[in-house]
Image: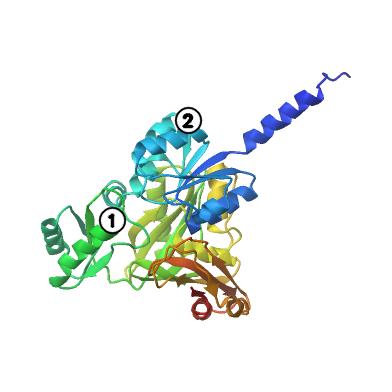
Amino acid sequence: MSFPFISVENMWFLINDYLCSMRKKILLLGSGELGKEFVISCQRLGQYVVAVDSYAEAPAMQVSNAFEVINMLDGDALDRIVEKHQPDLIVPEIEAIRTERFYDYEAAGIQVVPSAKAANFTMNRKAIRDLAAIEVGVRTAPYRYATSFEALKKGVEFTGMPCVVKPLMSSSGKGQSVIRTEEDIEKAWNYAMEGSRGDLKEVIVEGFIDFDYEITLLTVTQKNGDTLFCPPIGHRQERGDYQESWQPQVMNPEHLEVAKSMAARVTQALGGAGIWGVEFFITKEGAYFSELSPRPHDTGMVTLAGTQNFSEFELHARAVLGLPIPEIVATRNGASAVVLATKESNEWPTFSGLEKAASYTNSDFRIFGKPSTRPYRRMAVALTYGTESTVELVEKAKAMAAEIKVN
């Protein structure tokens, strides 16, 4: 038996070609704390990540292979870095992006996560709400849109009070408020305009759902067509932003199955592979669809406490790379509680109380590495886990988070 001769040089080229076929270049648009954990998960799988944000030294940039600082609402600037880096994948992590450009990138052969349609629709509450309520037909709160204060007043007349007002483009609850009286309407409009991201000045006004609790149902869509669900995550919000989350949220199995069906239908309509944070209001009658994010969810940071066999960031990385995920298995109870800044400063923050926080058993914490602070900015998260009830774990996480001071 004879073998064709392969020189050492040719063997190296073959090996290099094979390694390059496995190593993808990922352009991450948005480099906050969620992006940071995603970058770490990707690099553990041997990938190359370019982190992009509007300011330097963002958390994900600190662990990425390369970074860019641009205004992602500038379509020409976005085109330039795509041309410069020639990525295999584009992974959006925030809303304030000129997402309509994604269709051109996808047509050029770049994989947009989860898909150009999904990224474009879900960055705008109007598109995703109409798709869910009209095209897919899932149950939602009654709603109207408004591009002016007068239109908002008419929307409030339709939904009745109390009702919730949100900018169509925002993140982490910015600009979100509840209208309970006539005097609240103008305040809500002004607050929504202040919290709106990008150049879209429009709001959605929703009828208030008298819910028992809220959940995030992390939903994973895979390239082979399979859809998996993480155990439901409960959470509590203030100012529209999550303060604590816990997993699993104990709930009626029938309501959970309905929520899974809704999540599967909406994500299938949008297409693509990755993790989705699908939010629901749970009432005595069942589940109401609320919102959807095509990326790891802030409430899902509780999965960093080892509550399942893969964190939400590891699931996202595997799904977008096309690596099979046979199953998602719950491993233990867990909880998270945020650490917030109280003042505005452009100086790098320091933290005290870490020794006390580290003394808690069955716990961990993450300092995000944000280079500046402002009131209520999320700077760190405390994590707890164990066999205790999630109620007990939440209280423990809150106590632990209180030990950490942002200076």
**Is residue 197 in view from this perspective?**
yes
Residue at the extreme right: 1
Figure check: 45 above or below 180: above
Q: Mark 1 and mark 2: span between their CA atoms?
A: 32 Å
The residue closer to the viewer here, 349 or 12, is: 349
Q: Which of the labelled discs sits on residue 196, or is there none?
A: 1
Is 80 displayed left or right of 365 in the figure? left
The residue closer to the viewer here, 22 or 333, is: 22
Crowdedness near tag 1: few (<14), some (14–19) or many (≥20) residues, C-alpha within 10 Å: many
Figure check: 77 above or below 230: above
Answer with the quarter of the image where residue 65 lies.
top right
Q: Tell which tag, 1 or 2, sits nearer the viewer.
A: 1
Q: Which circle's residue, 1 or 2, is located before the other in the chain?
A: 2
The amino acid beneath tag 2 is Gly
- Image colouring: rainbow
Q: Position of residue 104 (x, y in %)?
A: 39, 32
The residue closer to the viewer here, 161 or 264, is: 161
Where the N terminus falls, by quadrant?
top right
**Is residue 326 in view from this perspective?**
no
Q: Residue at x 21, y 58 (%)?
A: 143
Residue position marked by numbered label 2 in the rendering: 109
Q: Residue at x 56, y 49 (%)?
A: 317
Answer with the quarter of the image where residue 163 lies.
bottom left
Q: Position of residue 208 (x, y in %)?
A: 24, 67
Q: Position of residue 402 (x, y in %)?
A: 49, 79
